[in-house]
Amino acid sequence: MYTQAMDTAGKDESKPKAVRSAEEMALEQKFDARIDAGDFIEPKDWMPDHYRKTLVRQISQHAHSEIVGMLPEGNWATRAPTLKRKAILLAKIQDEGGHGLYLYSAAETLGTSRDQMLEALHTGKAKYSSIFNYPTLTWADVGVIGWLVDGAAIMNQVPICRCSYGPYARAMIRICREESFHQRQGFDSLLVMMEKGTQAQRDMVQDAVNRWWWPSIMMFGPPDDQSPNSAQSMRWGIKRVSNDELRQRFIDATAEQAQVLGVRLPDPELKWNEQRQHYDFGAIDWSEFWRVIAGHGPCNRERLAARVKAWEEGAWVREAALAYARQQEPQAQAA
Ligand code: FAQ
C-alpha cells in the first residue's frame, strides 16, 4: 500500500512499443528530429507513447512532491517564533500548493486526469520525493528545508525549464523563481539563528543540518549507473543534466554556503579537490534511499494518511464546486 511505486499506467504498458507501421516510423523520425533541433513538443503534437508516459510519471511525481511537501512545514505553521516568520512560512506553503497545481495541469495536457493521478498517490502506487518522508522536529528544520531542500529542488529544476515538453518547461520558470525565494528565506532564517541566536539555537541548527544533509543529497535520485530512466529521458530532452552531475553541483554550492553559515556538513570526507575542481564527498547510504522510496521511511504512512484524510474531508468542496458549475452552465449557454 505504501510502496510509492509510480506507475500510473502499469509497468508493461510503460515499456517502449515496437514501431508498427511505416507511418508511425516516419512520425517518430520527425519527432526525434524536432527533439534534436531543440523544439518544444506541445500537447497536440504527435509523440511516442513512451515519451508521454515518462512525462506523466515524472510530472505527476513532481506535483505530488509539492503537495506532500507542504506537510512537513505545515507542522510549524502554528508554532513559528514570530509573526514575520509565520507570514513567510504560510506564503511558502501556499506557493508549494500552487506549484502542485501548475504541475497537475501540465500533466493533464498529456491526457491523464487529475483524479487518476491522485488515485495513484492515495493508493500508494505513485511516488513523491523521498525527502518528505522525514520529520520536522524543531523550528530549525524549517530553515534547513528552505536552505537544503529548496536548494536541491532549484538545482534539479532549473534545467527542467529547458525540458522538451512545452507545458512542463513553462510551468518550471515560475516555480524556479519562487523556489529561489524559498531557498533564500531558509538561509536567512538559519543565518539569524547562527549569528544572533543563543548556543542552544546554534546547536539546534547544527542538529537539523546533521539530519537533513544526507536525505537532501539523495533527492537527486540514484547514481547514474543505477538510474533506469536517465538514458531515455536525456535522449528526449526531458532531463538535461544527470542525477550525479546535479548532486555534485549542489554539494559544491552548499559546502561554500555552510561555511558562511558557520555549520558543519556531517561528512568527514567532504573536501575540496583541487584537481577535479569539485568537492569530494563520502559514500551515500543508498539502502536508506531505496527503503524510503519503498515506503519504509520515518513518515511515509503519516504523509499518505494526511493526504487521504484531506481528500476525503474535502469531498464536499468538490461536490459544491461541481454543483455550482452545473448551475452556471445554462446561464453561460444562454448568454
Ligand atoms: N524520491 O531512473 P531514476 C520540491 C525514483 S520538489 C522518490 O533516476 P528519473 C519542492 C524514480 O522515480 C522535489 N523517488 O528516475 C519543495 C524511479 O522510480 P520509477 C521533487 C525517486 O525520473 C521543496 C527510480 O527512483 N522534484 O522539493 C527519487 O529519471 C520544499 C529510479 O530513478 C522533482 O520531482 C526521489 N528523490 O529521475 C516542496 C523534480 N529519485 O518511477 C516543499 C522532477 C528517484 O521508475 C518544500 N523529477 N526516484 O518507479 C526529476 O527530476 C526526476 O524524476 C528525478 C528522478 C531526478 C527525481
Image (tube, grey):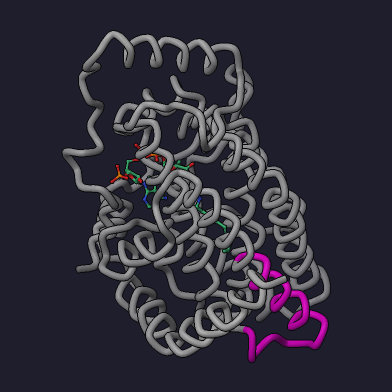
Image quadrant in which the N terminus is located:
bottom left
Image quadrant in which the C terminus is located:
bottom right
Q: Position of residue 229 (x, y in %)?
A: 34, 32
Residue 62, compared with residue 208, is above or below; it is above
Residue at the image position 61 percent from the left and 20 percent from the top: 39
Q: How many marks?
A: 0
| Left or right position of 10 against 147 | left
Q: Position of residue 123 (x, y in %)?
A: 26, 68
Residue at the image position 59 percent from the left and 64 percent from the top: 145
Q: Nearer the viewer, residue 32 or 3?
A: 32
Residue 144 in view: no
- In the image, farthest residue toward the front: 334
Q: Kindly indicate the quadrant of the structure image that contains residue 203.
A: bottom right
Q: Position of residue 53 (x, y in %)?
A: 35, 39
- In the image, farthest residue toward the left: 12
Q: Kindly indicate the quadrant of the structure image that contains residue 231.
A: top left
Q: Nearer the viewer, residue 179 or 193?
A: 179
Residue 39, compared with residue 188, is above or below; it is above
| Left or right position of 110 against 190 | left
Asked if residue 82 lies in the magenta stretch, the reply is yes
Residue at the image position 62 percent from the left and 79 percent from the top: 328
Asked if residue 276 lies in the magenta stretch, the reply is no
Q: Position of residue 124 (x, y in %)?
A: 27, 65
Residue 99 in view: yes
| Left or right position of 142 against 320 | right
Residue at the image position 48 percent from the left and 29 percent from the top: 242
Q: Nearer the viewer, residue 271 or 19?
A: 19
Q: Which residues are magenta?
A: 77-96
Residue 42, compared with residue 168, is above or below; it is above
* Dominant SS type (magenta): helix
